[in-house]
Image (cartoon, rainbow, N blue to C red):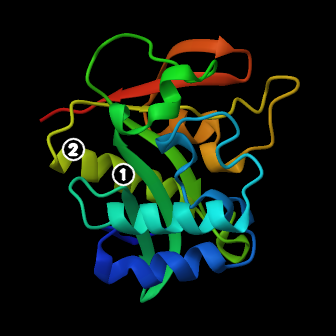
Amino acid sequence: MKLAVHALTPERWPDLEALFEARGCSEARGCWCMYYRVTGKGAYTRPSEAQRQAAHDALKALSAQDPPPGLLGYRGDTPVGWVSLGPREDFAKLRRSPAMKAVDDQAVWSIVCLVVPSEYRKQGVARAMLQGAVAYARKRGVRLIEAYPVDKSEAGAPDAPWFGSLAMFDELGFEEVARHQPARPIVRLKLAR
């Protein structure tokens, strides 16, 4: 699938809201892709309305910063996908995550979440978003990009589609560099300048 992929900006914020309000995106509107950007016990695990609003407002504020907190994918004028990415240090919760803790001290950008509304799933949107994220990172001069997919071949693999599947990352040339939990590899892609 061919998508136009653009960085989230304040002008594109209404498109992100529309995407997160779509059917099948309840997890996204629960944390507004802030879950891994903040620390604190229980942050966004079962968010209250006040926490959801705070996360919404925090992500909206990040849309005006550089680098942006993620990318939107469009089919024509319709937003159909989202990928949250940026420098690993922007994702505070990764430091304490058993599955996603740092492999080394190399400078990496992390791909943390992929969001695709129900009506656009199984059409290649997530793969196109991932390709867009790689192209965007390359254009920004990023040398190493990292992700934390789910290995669905492992028994007990979590049903967490927002991480993406290991197979999808494998197809795009990512290589496994660590596995702190059986179904949760850490994969990387070296980007040539």
User: Which amino acid lies under the numbered mark 2 shown in the image of this protein?
Assistant: Arg
Residue 133's disc number: 1
Residue 32 in the image: above or below residue 92: below
Locate residue 135, reporting x and y percent: 28, 51
In the image, what residue occupies the spot 53% across and 78% down? Answer: 17
Residue 147 visible at all:
no
Locate residue 2, reporting x and y percent: 42, 70
In the image, what residue occupies the spot 57% across and 76% down? Answer: 19
Per the image, label 2 sits on a secondary structure element best described as helix
Locate residue 46, reporting x and y percent: 77, 51
Q: In this view, which residue lies farthest toward the front?
A: 50
Residue 25 in the image: above or below residue 69: below
Q: Is residue 188 left or right of residue 45?
A: left
Residue 96's disc number: none
Q: Is residue 111 left or right of residue 29?
A: left
In the image, what residue occupies the spot 54% across and 35% down? Answer: 39
Q: Rate crowding at label 2 as few (under 14), some (14 to 19) or many (20 or more) other CA atoms within 10 Å.
A: some
Per the image, label 1 sits on a secondary structure element best described as helix
Q: Is residue 37 left or right of residue 96?
A: left
For residue 98, what is the image quadrant? top right
Q: In this view, which residue lies farthest toward the bottom?
A: 77
The residue labelled by disc 2 is 138
Give the quarter of the figure containing the C terminus: top left
In the image, what residue occupies the spot 42% across and 87% down? Answer: 76
Locate residue 90, reporting x and y percent: 36, 39
Closer to the chain start, of discs 1 and 2, is 1
**Spatial CA span between label 1 and label 2:** 8 Å
Q: Rate crowding at label 1 as few (under 14), some (14 to 19) or many (20 or more) other CA atoms within 10 Å.
A: many
Q: Are marks 1 and 2 in contact (CB under 8 Å)?
A: no
User: Which amino acid lies under the numbered mark 1 shown in the image of this protein?
Assistant: Ala
For residue 22, what is the image quadrant? bottom right
